[in-house]
Amino acid sequence: MLLLAVAVSVAAPSGGRQDFVSAAQGQEIRDWSALAAQVAPSVVQITTERDVEPSAQGYGGNRRWNQDFRRFFRDHGFVLPFDEEEDLPGFSDDNPFSQFTPPESESGSGFIVLSEQGAPRIITNRHVVSDTDRISVRFANGVRADATLLGSDAETDLALLRVEGFDAESAEIVPVVLGDSDKASLGSPVLAVGNPFGLGGTVTSGIVSARGRELGSSVFVDFIQTDAAINPGNSGGPLFNEQGEVIGVNTAIFTRTGAWAGIGFAIPSNAARGIIATLEVQGSISRGWLGVRFQPVSADLAKGLQLDEPKGALISEVLPDSPAEQAGLAAGDLILRFDGTDIPDHRALAPAVAKVSPGDEAEISVWRNGAIVTATVSLGERPVPEGQANAERKQNRQEKDDSLIKAAGMRVRVLDNELRNRLRLDGDVEGLAVLWVRPGSPAAEAGLQPRDVILLVNGEVPNAVQVLDEAFDDDPTPLVLQIHRGTNSFFTALVPKP
């Protein structure tokens, strides 16, 4: 145990770090407080919400539970608002109110960078913001803003966000500097900042404990390993060096319990830099595709292939109708060079192929039957992983969703005969039925609830969803809404957030 009571302060080097040396044990303790204060405004907390699909068993559990619920209250003399069982919210598959049960919410981390045009952007992990319906960010000073996914890449687990409609001055935007991750050597001190378990503004320190780690099926990233504590919620947050530069994006942990066990992994900044620049412009990453499965070459395989030493990437399978098959490559070929780049081992092949644009030609040198053979291949486009394809399809659906009023945080629908019958309204009632309200949103703060009916917006009957959407977006003045709920009507103010 280090004895801080006998620590002696020494001069602080650049970057604000102070060193304390224990006179009793001669061990060094780093004071990261100055650097933590410097970089904290660059880190944001990301909150995502995903709408939950309605349960086939109905609202509030299952059909039997609802029957027992109704029987209990009827036996005790209570009159329920719905006389028929099928009118209970959630029992009907086409019930519009059953479509928006309370959303699932998760939390992650991110950090602020500036685009080439000087606009603030947020880097995070793709798994933090994938398969979600809404994204919001909370800056270090507490200011909140909605965010939009500009693009993501499943192969590297990176994503880029654009912050929507906020005052940059009030948010106190402080962009980071992306450092040179290649300079981070074994034992280099690092600082991780993020929001583990939703606890904002958490700082942990450690060292670079390994370089060039492979994780799962990732073939485009050689991860930085660190012993700085990284837990669920840290994903997407920055890993800083002593100069306050980001050298990694915290992404994953190795654990048998689900919590930190001393080993975490970060995407090197040098690998992230080019990906983020492309996502800013294109929204996705297009990579060349050869269409082979390959493996490393062991010492025994090298001898069997008449090689002086293990090297290259050994083709174990050529996929049908692939560029490799069309170029005449076959299982057993050993790729030694691709498009002018030497392939020292199997890990070098995929990045080399990915750098060539789909449709371009590349020259390949392979070792076949004791001799070098050269072939020319016209690369295809690497298929998009199914998970990313699903996310893109979902995002397209969201863009077509004209019932969501993002600024207000609710979904509404113009009253039709079906909704009037469900809400037991007279046939001449006009307005918007509230289907779902996001917790903490302006709509929730105004007291709106699902099954409410907005009769008037500033004295006018809203005959379309966009009427309320445009009124809320165009004018910072609170909207005066007349609401019908049950057998009563009342007024409330819908207040835009800055």
Image: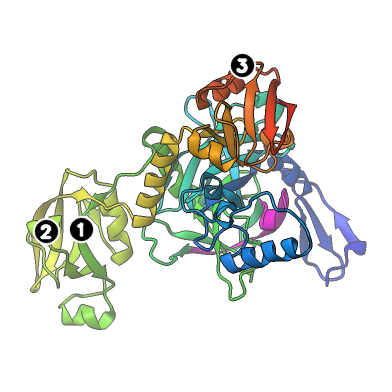
Picture coordinates of residue 245 (x, y %)?
A: 60, 43
Q: Mark 1 points at which residue?
A: 337
> Which kind of residue does numbered mark 1 sit on?
Arg
Q: Residue 198's x, y, as percent?
A: 69, 53
CA distance for labels 3 and 1? 71 Å
Type of amino acid under label 3: Glu
Marks 2 and 3 close (CB-CB < 8 Å) = no
Across and down, in percent, residue 436 comes to: 59, 42
- At which x and y percent is residue 474? 59, 17
- Using a 10 Å C-alpha cutoff, classify the residue at mark 3 as few (fewer than 14 neighbours), some (14 to 19) or many (20 or more): few
- Indicate whether residue 63 is drawn in magenta: no
Question: Residue 497 occupies which quadrant of the picture?
Answer: top right
The image shows residue 459, relative to residue 363, as above or below, that is: above
* Quadrant occupied by the N terminus: bottom right
Question: Which one is in front in this view, the residue at disc 2 or the one at disc 3?
Answer: 3
- Decide if residue 344 is on the left or right side of residue 410: left
- Which SS class for mark 3? loop
Q: Mark 2 points at which residue?
A: 321
Q: Is residue 205 magenta?
A: yes
- Name the residue nearer the viewer: 356 or 190: 356
Instruction: Point out the tag, 3 or 1, that comes first from the N-terminus.
Output: 1
Q: Which residue is drawn at 42% across and 57% down?
A: 221
Q: Is mark 2 on a helix, strand or loop?
A: loop
Q: Give the range drawn in magenta.
A: 194-211
Q: How far apart are marks 1 and 2 (CA)?
A: 22 Å
Q: Which is more toward the observer, 228 or 256?
A: 256
Q: Mark number for residue 460?
A: 3
Q: Which of marks 1 and 2 is nearer the N terminus?
A: 2
Would you say residue 231 is visible in this rendering? yes
